[in-house]
Image (tube, grey):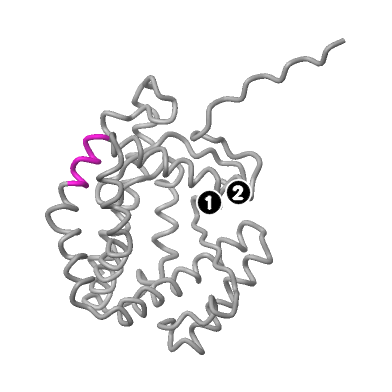
Amino acid sequence: MKTRKMMKFASLGAALLALALLQGCAAGPNPRDPFEPFNRSVSRFNEGLDEAIVKPVAQVYQGVVPSPVRTGVHNFFGNLSDVWSFVNNVLQAKPAAAVDSLMRVGVNTVLGMGGLLDWATEMGIERHREDFGKTLGRWGVDAGPYLVLPVLGSSTVRDTAALVVDTKGDLLSHVNDVPLRNSLYVLRAVDLRASVLRAGDVLDQAALDKYSFTRDSYLQRRGVVIEATSETEERYDLPEKAPSPSPAR
């Protein structure tokens, strides 16, 4: 119970932090990233934590645990996320995507031994990843400036506020056995980090400014995803369009 309360307070604190930054900080030279000094300092903290603990653990996990087992773990957590995606597809009034998500959960839970096997993908049922931040964007809530959260990483003001709801929608948060719940949280984090080990190494070698690259990639990805469902979403990742020339008379 204490861990669940701590998670709720952490999510609420993150949302309040985002709102405080939004109200208290003057806009900087980059309209997408007015909190850049703060964001860079948090990003450095996250990178240090990753290098010291998270990445080494993920490397050991990838090196020791057999690939079929890691695939099963990844599928299991993916199946849990499909449940919350179903809810958000319903909230976004996307019936076809909601049906796909519901079918994925049903197929993988029943035929896939609780989600360890991803039969839904083999059957061609598309996965539609959604969260409450995207749902807010679907109904016209602007993303707001870029924000880097401790441990959690890239976000925006809107997505940070949405974490309060996303935390409640996370099925793991409803596991009553505290040691089991905490173990699942850790396993999910390690699985997620292990899945991007190669991409992280490429980023370290290719990006001249890792922070800027990560920020721009995140904003672009979130903008493109939400633009597909809402024309009112503000795009922070693209330059303003030049006005069209008047037709010649």
Q: Which mark is residue 50?
A: none
**Circle 2 sits in a helix, a strand or a loop, which is it?**
helix
Query: Which residue is disc 2 drawn over?
Result: 138
Q: Is residue 196 magenta?
A: no
Kind of residue at badge 2: Arg
Image position of 201 with respect to 127: above or below: above
Q: Are marks 2 and 1 in contact (CB under 8 Å)?
A: yes
Question: Which residue has dot 1 on it?
Answer: 134
The image quarter in which residue 88 lies: bottom right
Q: Nearer the viewer, residue 43 or 217?
A: 217
Write the residue at 61% across / 59% down: 91
Placement of 120 over or under 57, stated as above or below:
below
Give neighbour class at mark 1: few <14, some 14-19, many 20+ (Cα, 10 Å).
Answer: many
In the image shown, does 144 or 77 lie closer to the viewer? Answer: 77
The structure residue drawn at horizontal position 15% and vertical position 47%, both measured from the top left corner, is 48
Q: Is residue 53 left or right of residue 208?
A: left
- Quarter of the picture containing the C terminus is top right
The image quadrant that residue 126 belongs to is bottom right
Local SS, label 1: helix
Quarter occupied by the N terminus: bottom left
Magenta segment: 40-47
In the image, is residue 233 above or below residue 68?
above
Q: At label 1, which amino acid type do we have?
A: Lys
Work out whether residue 165 or residue 146 is closer to the camera in this orientation and state it.
146
Classify 10 Å Cα crowding around label 2: few (below 14), some (14-19), many (20 and above).
Answer: many
In x, y percent, where is residue 148?
32, 41
